[in-house]
């Protein structure tokens, strides 16, 4: 009888112990599930620009590299329109979990100065991850520009104010040329185009005098005898045109404008996720294969830290705001 009561007592105590332990175990399991390592599913890169251009190409190169490094699918979706606002809006409203990212260009930073009502802040509205790649765009001139260098275009514009034009298929091109006017004293007037090919047609036809282009695309036109390269806008010479000096080398020190591609996450994405993505991009972009693939598209692979990218965003924003103000450019 005593033995029976003892067993019953022990059973009761064991049940109480199990009852106390089970919630702790359940909590521990739930904790483990919530701490699953990132990433575990498909990552989508939203490109707010149409397919087929340099931004789209470089996004797809990056996607292949990240997919192999992170062992999850990384896909690209093009969401063009409204000066990149459609794609930016989609990412800004996405869950901040690292699975929907924005892959955009330096033109995204210029958009608030050019587009009325553009509500997306490239600095405060998203989490910067990395500066992916950069490009030394070139100053393309019509074949009738004397001297074949920047000063010939500057002098021509001063001699014929209101008669020398640059073709601008984008707001970013407009800001670069207005900056060039301010630094050199040139008086090159804008003509706006809906597309880069339309601007090229008028360069070749001699109806405008200059435009901005990536070195890889400009190379084909120059080889065909359709135009000449007058200068490199960036901080260093372009490999495609090693004999063409930069704007700074041609007497305007301090001038150095590079186009770039960058990667952002929605605001509020956890620091740990940002760090994982940053480290993955840095690793991928520093491989020889990635450098070759980007160079084939006229780009230099960068793969910066988030801090470096954030500094670039602040510097670009300050520059373009000043250029737009000094040029009297109002958002349209």
Image (tube, rainbow, N blue to C red):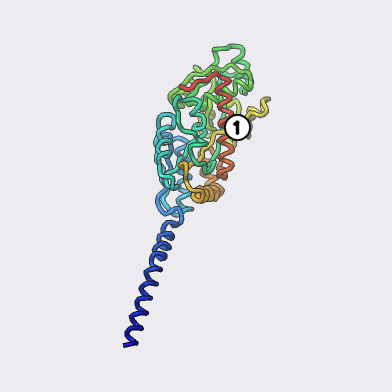
Q: Position of residue 182 (x, y in %)?
A: 61, 21
Q: Position of residue 133 (x, y in %)?
A: 54, 40
The answer to which quarter of the image holds residue 81 is top left
Q: Nearer the viewer, residue 5 or 259?
A: 5
Residue under numbered circle 1: 234
Q: Is residue 284 visible?
A: no
* Count of marks placed on residues: 1
Q: Nearer the viewer, residue 156 or 261?
A: 261
- Decide: is 66 above or below 163: below
- Decide: is 53 above or below 11: above
Position of 53 with respect to 233 (left or right) is: left
The answer to which quarter of the image holds residue 209 is top right
Which quadrant does the C terminus fall into? top left
What residue appears at the point 56 percent right and 19 percent down from the top-left corner? Answer: 327
Position of 90 with respect to 172 (left or right) is: left
Q: Nearer the viewer, residue 284 or 290?
A: 284
Q: Position of residue 107 (x, y in %)?
A: 50, 31
Secondary structure under the numbered disc 1 in the rendered image: loop
Which quadrant does the N terminus fall into? bottom left
Mark 1 neighbour class, 10 Å CA radius: few under 14, some 14 to 19, many 20 or more: many
What residue appears at the point 44 percent right and 53 percent down from the top-left corner? Answer: 39
Q: Is residue 25 visible?
A: yes
Q: Position of residue 123 (x, y in %)?
A: 52, 36
- Decide: is 207 above or below 222: above
């Amino acid at each position: 009888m005593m033995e029976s009561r003892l067993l019953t007592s022990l059973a009761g105590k064991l049940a109480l112990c199990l009852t106390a332990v089970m919630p702790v175990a359940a909590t521990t399991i739930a904790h483990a599930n919530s701490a699953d390592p990132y990433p575990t599913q498909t990552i989508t890169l939203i490109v707010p620009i149409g397919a087929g251009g340099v931004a789209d190409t470089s996004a797809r190169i990056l996607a292949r590299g990240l997919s192999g490094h992170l062992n999850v699918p990384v896909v690209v979706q093009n969401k063009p329109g409204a000066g990149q606002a459609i794609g930016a809006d989609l990412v800004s409203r996405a869950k901040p979990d690292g699975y929907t990212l924005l892959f955009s260009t330096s033109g995204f930073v210029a958009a608030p100065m050019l587009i009325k009502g553009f509500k997306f802040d490239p600095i405060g509205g998203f989490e910067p991850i990395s500066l992916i790649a950069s490009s030394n765009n070139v100053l393309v001139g019509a074949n009738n520009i004397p001297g074949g260098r920047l000063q010939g275009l500057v002098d021509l514009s001063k001699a014929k104010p209101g008669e020398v034009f640059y073709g601008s298929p984008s707001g970013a091109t407009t800001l670069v040329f207005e900056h060039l006017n301010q630094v050199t004293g040139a008086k090159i007037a804008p003509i706006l185009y809906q597309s880069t090919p339309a601007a090229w047609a008028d360069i070749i036809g001699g109806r405008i005098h200059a435009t901005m282009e990536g070195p890889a695309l400009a190379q084909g036109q120059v080889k065909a005898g359709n135009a000449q390269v007058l200068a490199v806008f960036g901080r260093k010479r372009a490999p495609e045109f090693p004999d063409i000096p930069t704007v700074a080398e041609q007497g305007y020190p301090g001038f150095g404008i590079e186009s770039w591609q960058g990667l952002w996450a929605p605001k509020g994405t956890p620091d740990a996720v940002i760090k994982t993505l940053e480290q993955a991009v840095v690793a991928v972009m520093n491989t020889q294969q990635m450098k070759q693939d980007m160079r084939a598209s006229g780009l230099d692979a960068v793969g910066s830290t988030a801090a470096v990218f954030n500094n670039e965003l602040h510097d670009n924003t300050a520059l373009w705001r000043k250029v737009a103000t000094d040029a009297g450019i109002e958002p349209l």
